[in-house]
Amino acid sequence: PGQGECTRCPHPLSSGSGGVTCSICKEDYYLLSTSVDPNDIWMAPTEHCKPCPPNAFCPTNTTLETLVVPQGYWRASSSSAALTECRSFGGDGEAGKTRCAGSELDAGDASRRRMIEEVSPSDEYCAPGFYGPECRLCVADKHHLVDGDTCRDCLPLGSVV
């Protein structure tokens, strides 16, 4: 008795290398919920594998939580598929990219991860020193955003400019 023939995974499913079940989403799709039974995914693949959101990157086996957010974009949490382009807020065209680092982290970004844990989950998409929607707030106390990508000290109360 030999091995049976392989069955192609229904669109948009895939299987891992050497895998025997079609329970992951192929490239350009993401799995909406990781708590779904693999048999349910097989029976209704388009209910569970959704097209990658505009401006996000979805390699094979992406889930909603692991969507790759490019530099210059932000999302409110890892449970949101909505990406927001970071505006310049008075800076040049690159200011949004400077503040919004996206989710493509280098392995050596331990200090950034530590800073993220101190703020909130949505801030994992912000460059060091920034947090909040579109990363437009300064982490440092008594600092404000200047030229769209720089945090500067606030002037003391009563100062005249």
Image (cartoon, rainbow, N blue to C red):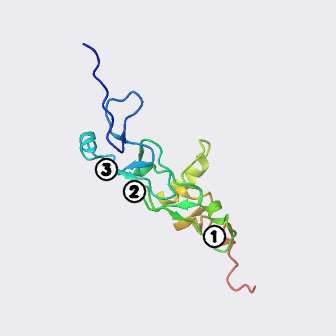
Mark 1 and mark 3 in contact (Cβ < 8 Å)? no
Q: Nearer the viewer, residue 5 or 15?
A: 5
- State how many labels appear: 3
**Which residue bears the numbered disc 1?**
88
Mark 2 burial class by Cα count in 10 Å: few <14, some 14-19, many 20+: some
In front: label 3 or label 1: 3
Would you name the residue on which mark 3 appears? 46
Q: Amino acid at mark 1?
A: Ser
Residue 5 on image: x %, y %: 30, 24
Q: Nearer the viewer, residue 2 or 83?
A: 2
Q: Residues within 10 Å of mark 3 (few under 14, many from 20)?
A: some
In this rendering, would 2 be left or right of 133? left
Q: Earlier in the sequence, mark 1 or mark 2?
A: 2
Residue 99 falls in image quadrant: bottom right
Name the N-terminal-most of marks 3 and 2: 3
Look at the numbered disc 1 and give the secondary structure of its residue: loop
Give coordinates of residue 110: x percent, y percent.
59, 46
- Which residue does the image show at 41% across and 49% down from the upper left? 29
Pointers 3 and 2 in contact (C-beta within 8 Å): no
Q: Which mark is residue 79?
A: 2
User: Which amino acid lies under the numbered mark 3 shown in the image of this protein?
Assistant: Thr
Residue 8 visible in the current orientation: yes
Residue 118 x/y as whole percent: 52, 57
Q: Residue furthest right?
A: 161
**Above or below 152: residue 126:** above
Q: Position of residue 13 (x, y in %)?
A: 35, 42
Measured in 3D between alpha carbons, the distance from the residue under mark 3 to the one under mark 2, in whole angstroms, is 19 Å
Describe residue 154's horizontal placement relative to residue 115 as left or right: right
